[in-house]
Amino acid sequence: MGEYTVAKTSVWWDIENCCVPCSCDPQLIVQNMSSALATAGYRGPISVSAYGGTHQIPHNVQHALSSTGVSLNHVPAGTHRLHLHWGLTRSKVMTRSRPFA
């Protein structure tokens, strides 16, 4: 793995289609992500950006996620979601083809 083990990891989370489970403490999500990455050998910093209809997320959950560093990004229904999907897909392709860019 080499230099990738300490590289920054960015998580882009579709929070609308993969929401916080009722049984899960939202304040532990970033910690759980970091632990899973560390178990896989990645020990660099992590940033988490959540995208989706944030109006559907209870305020206490939004606050808990924000307090742990999750960046909540409201993406309204419609064509904006298509742009988000296109952007995420393009980013994945660019990352795979130019990992050091």
Image (cartoon, helix red, strand yellow):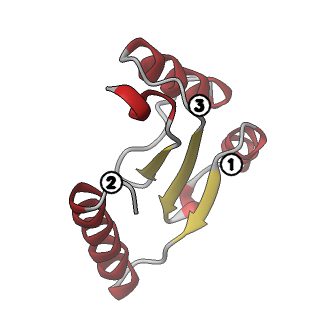
* Residue mark closest to the camera, 1 vs 3: 3
Occupied quadrant, residue 60: top right
Is the residue marked by circle 2 packed among few (<14), some (14-19), or many (20+) residues within 10 Å?
few
Determine the secondary structure under disc 3: helix
| Front-most of residues 77 and 66 | 66
Q: Quadrant of the C terminus?
A: bottom left
Label at residue 84: none
Identity of the residue drawn at 23% across and 55% down: 96
On the image, the x and y values in percent for residue 31 come to 60, 23
| Front-most of residues 5 and 71 | 5
Label at residue 62: 1
On the image, the x and y values in percent for residue 95 come to 30, 58
Callouts 1 and 3 close, C-beta under 8 Å: no
Mark nearer the N terminus (2 vs 3): 3
Identity of the residue drawn at 55% across and 54% down: 49
Callouts 2 and 3 close, C-beta under 8 Å: no
Label at residue 30: 3
Amino acid type of the residue tagged 1 in the rendering: Gln
> With 99 as the anchor, is 28 left or right in this view?
right
Determine the secondary structure under disc 1: helix
Measure how far apart labels 2 and 3 are at the Cα level. 24 Å
Farthest front residue?
Answer: 2
Q: Quadrant of the N terminus?
A: top left
Determine the secondary structure under disc 2: loop
Find disc 2 in the rendering and name its residue.
99
Residue 23 appears in the rendering: no
* Residue mark closest to the camera, 2 vs 3: 2
* Residue mark closest to the camera, 2 vs 1: 2
